[in-house]
Image (cartoon, rainbow, N blue to C red):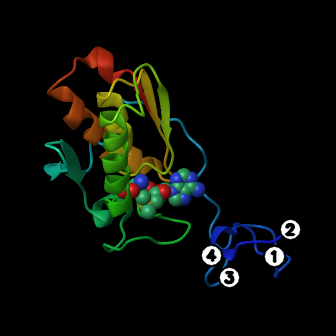
Amino acid sequence: MATNSTFQLFSSSSGVSGFFDSSTETPLPPPPPPVEVLSSEVSLNVICSVEPVNLEDGLTLLKGRVSTKEVFGLPNSDLVPGVYEGGLKLWEGSLDLIKALQAEVQNGHLSFSGKRVLELGCGHGLPGIFAFLEGASAVHFQDFNAEVLQSLTIPNVNANLSEKLSPFYIKRCKF
Ligand SMILES: C[S@@+](CC[C@H](N)C(=O)[O-])C[C@H]1O[C@@H](n2cnc3c(N)ncnc32)[C@H](O)[C@@H]1O
């Protein structure tokens, strides 16, 4: 079977099992253990300031800003493979995704009403938040780093939902 090195998790050439940085073939530390994070488990140790993100057609969402140094003890950088995978930064692709989803909703090709949504590698979680505001019955957020969920995703959910919704609705969002 053909392999695509971009998506390679295990080294094919070294014969050593484990996770590898596919660009350098250097071994990565073991990934963090899978844990469930409850919406009440917001980080109390990190300052998260909130700012607006203006999308198209009058849609504005709120996003937090936290320091990579404060959360991970790392200098500000996009990512450290196997340790911090970039979840504290807002990546342009998620905004493009929201714009595409919004266009599909507006032209009647998509409805989130009553849907259950899972956002993988969510970071800020703005697409999941958009789905929720569009009527999803439940949204689950998942990320490589629990710290990202606790210091950024949960505050983003709370900031975007608190103006419009009661705590009952916030319970529909799972991490
Ligand atoms: C490029 S960032 C994108 C973040 C966010 N979706 C955005 O667009 O702003 C990649 C995200 O995927 C997460 N990630 C990377 N590897 C992952 C894995 N194996 N399982 C879950 N999340 C992962 C990172 O923690 C990070 O939040």
Residue placed farthest to the front in the image?
A: 107
Q: Which residue is mark 1?
A: 12
> Please, which residue is most extreme toward the top here?
168
Residue 35's spot in the image, x, y percent?
55, 40
Tell me which amino acid carries mark 1.
Ser
Q: Are marks 3 and 4 in contact (CB under 8 Å)?
A: yes
Q: In this figure, which residue is indicated by the disc labeled 2? A: 1
- Mark 4 packing: few (<14 Cα in 10 Å), some, or many (20+)? some
Q: Residue shown at 46%/47% (left/top)?
A: 146
Quadrant of the drawing holding the C terminus: top left
Q: Is residue 105 above or below residue 46?
A: above
Q: Is residue 8 above or below residue 153?
A: below
Q: Earlier in the sequence, mark 4 or mark 1?
A: 1
Q: Residue at x 65, y 67 (%)?
A: 7
CB of mark 1 near ligand 1 (< 8 Å): no
What distance separates the C-alpha of mark 4 from that of mark 2?
21 Å
Specify which label sits upstream in the sequence, 2 or 3. Answer: 2
The answer to whether 22 appears left or right of 52 in the picture is right
Q: Which residue is mark 4?
A: 21
Mark 3, residues whose alpha carbon is within 10 Å: few (<14), some, or many (≥20)? some
Position of the N terminus by quadrant: bottom right
Is label 3 in a helix, a strand or a loop?
A: loop
Q: Are marks 3 and 1 in contact (CB under 8 Å)?
A: no
Q: Nearer the viewer, mark 4 or mark 2?
A: 2
**Amino acid type at image mark 4:** Asp
Circle 1 — which element?
loop
Q: Are marks 4 and 2 in contact (CB under 8 Å)?
A: no
Per the image, the residue denoted by label 3 is 25
